Amino acid sequence: MLFYFEVDIINEGKNKEIEIGFCENRANLSGFPGWYDGSWGYHGDDGNFYCCSGSGNPYGPLFSTGDTIGCYLNFKNNNVFYTKNGINLGSY
């Protein structure tokens, strides 16, 4: 199964904390994507990719108002990559 979605950042908000990700049905939704088991996310405030824990790994550039972030999921190959303004940031 392949999925792709894009998010246009129209307002980064007061705290500038924008995170874009995905999760399983069982994931804890009380925090940002990637902070808890069963969730993954690319965080715009630090450029890190978070995978099921509160510790992120360097991934891509920061993003904020005016940017478009895309997320490509390939569940057949267990692959994910993001784009920033149409530029592929590479697989994670």
Image: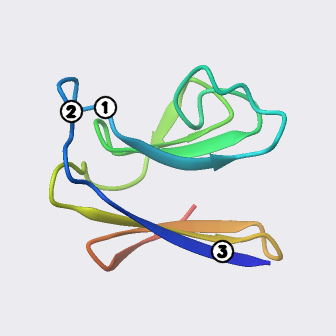
Q: Secondary structure at mark 1?
A: loop
Give the image location of residue 53, x and y in percent. Answer: 64, 27
Gap between marks 3 and 2 measured at Cα: 27 Å
Quarter of the image that includes the C terminus: bottom right
**Picture quadrant of residue 36:** top right
- The residue nearer to you, when weighing 15 against 88, is 15
Quarter of the image that includes the N terminus: bottom right
Mark 3 and mark 2 lie on one chain; the one further toward the N terminus is 3
Circles 3, 2 touching at the beta carbon (< 8 Å) = no
Which residue does the image show at 79% across and 45% down from the upper left? 24
Give the image location of residue 6, x and y in percent. Answer: 43, 68
Circles 1, 2 touching at the beta carbon (< 8 Å) = yes
Identify whether 31 is placed above or below 75: above
**Total marks placed:** 3
Q: Of the residues tagged 1 and 2, which is closer to the observer?
A: 2
Give the image location of residue 2, x and y in percent. Answer: 71, 79
**Residue, far front:** 10
Left of 25 or right of it: where is 59?
A: left
Which residue in the protein does label 1 denote? Answer: 17
Q: Which mark is residue 13?
A: 2
Report the amino acid beneath label 1.
Glu
Structural crowding at the residue carrying mark 2, measured as other residues with C-alpha within 10 Å and reported as few (<14), some (14–19) or many (≥20): few
Left of 17 or right of it: where is 77?
A: right
Which residue does the image show at 83% across and 76% down from the upper left? 76
Which residue does the image show at 68% across and 68% down from the upper left? 79
Which residue does the image show at 21% across and 40% down from the upper left? 12
Q: Secondary structure at mark 2?
A: loop
Which residue in the protein does label 3 denote? Answer: 3
Report the amino acid beneath label 2.
Gly
Gap between marks 1 and 2 measured at Cα: 7 Å
Mark 1 and mark 3 lie on one chain; the one further toward the N terminus is 3
Q: Secondary structure at mark 3?
A: strand
